[in-house]
Each structure stands twice: as structure tokens, then as C-alpha cells.
Amino acid sequence: MSEHLAQDNLLGTYLKDRRSRLDPAAFGFAAERRRTPGLRREEVAQRANISPTWYTWLEQGRGGAPSADVLDRIARALMLTDVEREHLFLLGLGRAPEVRYQRSEGVTPRLQRVLDALSPSPAVIRSATWDVVAWNRAASVMLTDYGALPPHQRNILRFIFLDPRVRAAQYDWESVARFVVGAFRVDAARAGAATAVQPFVDELCRLSPEFAAMWRDNDVRSHGEGVKHLRHPILGPIAFEYSAFAVDGRPDLSMVVYNPIEPEVADKIRELMEKAPAL
């Protein structure tokens, strides 16, 4: 009977399991004379600033569905990770929580090794606000020498609208620029970063009348896959097939890989990589 109830009350079972894993002493609660491990229900309710009775009902599967605000406060009270918080919302409301934007500062060494293994295909990892946070050597010689730039300058919109060399490398600059602006708008909104990027948008509007005009158009685009044509200063015209991939566990990041359409271009990229200064 108890097993059947646990299956019917997955939210309550999950809450009970999460609070049982917490150390009361770490939160300033007395740890002695406890019959069960972890925090008590009233202690979780206190940390979440909700009624102890309401929290008890949640664990018991009573009282109806909780609000998103209540689940968010419980997630903070239980010190849930982003993945655990998402699971809590799926159990409680049947949907994922709204995205909370967090600025990306870099990638793990393992993810960098994945990028490096993709050479001679240029590959980068960009944030939801289109900052390039990681790249491989092929990307440095074919796209931009990101390592030579300060981090705040490694933004794709800055390159497209403010860097004459990047602009000259595009076959149809206006089409590329409109695509980038539309995809950037979607990614920023999807990541919950619309407010966070506003100062950057305002800056670009001041520095580039073309960006300001395209931003006012409110176009949206999807950046999934396609063909990218470039005029490389050494290799000349080159066509890449590109694909964008979400990074599992990092909803703020996307990996973009550019594969040369012509097989012989890969050999030419390798030659450039060998001649280029060591990173």
C-alpha cells in the first residue's frame, strides 16, 4: 500500500528524499535527538518562508498543485542544483521552470578537449548572448583570433557590426547581419537574458546605425544548421556546412561546428594551423 502511495505522490517522495540528505547543523539547526536524518518539514518550511502545514501537505500529496513561486522557494531551501530544480518543477507542475540567466565565464577542460578533437573543422562555443567563450585552433586561423582579444570583445555581434575585417569576409553582409540579429534576439529571450543584454544592445545601437535599424525590425531567426560562405584572406572563398548543438547540462551554451564542404580545404586548414603561432 505504501509503495503504491509513493508512486502516486512522486513530488512528495522527492521532497522527502532531498531534505533527508541535508545536514541540519550546516543550516544552524540542532542535530541531536532526531529520529530521521536530514531537515524536519518545519525547518524546510521555515527556510522557504511558507506555512509548515502547506509544506506537510505537499509531501503528503494534499492541497493541489503548488505555485511556481512556492516551488522556487523550496528549491532554494533544499539547495537544489539546476537539474534537481528542473525535476522538482516537472513533478510539481508538469513543466520545466522559467529559465534563469547566468553569465557564462568559460568551459570545462573536458569540453575544450572536445573542441580540439574536431580540428580541422573550426568550432566555437558561444553563450546565449553570443559571446565566444571557447574555440579550437582551426577557429582561430579561419574565423577570428579570439585569444588576442579581451573577453568582453569576443562577441559575434561586435565582430559583424564593428569589425571591418569580419564584415569584408562575408559574401552577403546584410543577410548575415540580419540573421545574426534575429537569432541573437531569440537566444537571449529563451535564456531569460533580455534584460541583461539591454546595455549591450544600447551600446551597439549607439555605435552602429545599421544594427539599430535591424534591431527595430524585431525579426527572429533560428540558428540550427546551414551553409556559411567566407572570403578568407589567405585561402580565398570557402564554404562550410555549419551545425549548432546544445551543450548538455549547460542550457546557456551552444557549440557551433563548421565543416568544410570541399575535402581539400581541410588539408589547407591543417597547413595554416601548423604555420600559425602557438596558442
Image: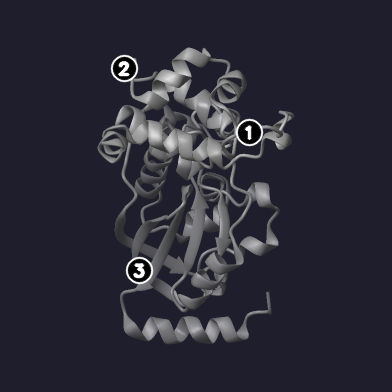
- SS label for mark 3: strand
**In which quarter of the view is residue 266 placed?**
bottom left
Which of the two discs, 1 and 3, sits closer to the camera? 1
In this image, 227 relative to 129: left or right? Answer: left
Q: Residue at x 38, y 19 (%)?
A: 66
- What number is the disc on residue 240? 3
Q: CA distance from mark 2 to mark 1?
A: 30 Å
Q: Are the residues at dot 1 and dot 3 in contact (C-beta closer than 8 Å)?
A: no
> Which residue corresponds to mark 1?
34
The residue at the point 48 percent across, 81 percent down is 269
Residue 209 in the figure: left or right of residue 63: right
Residue at the spot of label 2: 64
Image coordinates for residue 160, horizontal then vertical, percent: 50, 49
- Front position among marks 2 and 3: 2
Of the image marks 2 and 1, the number of the one nearer the N terminus: 1
How far is the residue under mark 2 from the one under mark 3? 53 Å
Mark sitting earlier along the chain (1/3): 1
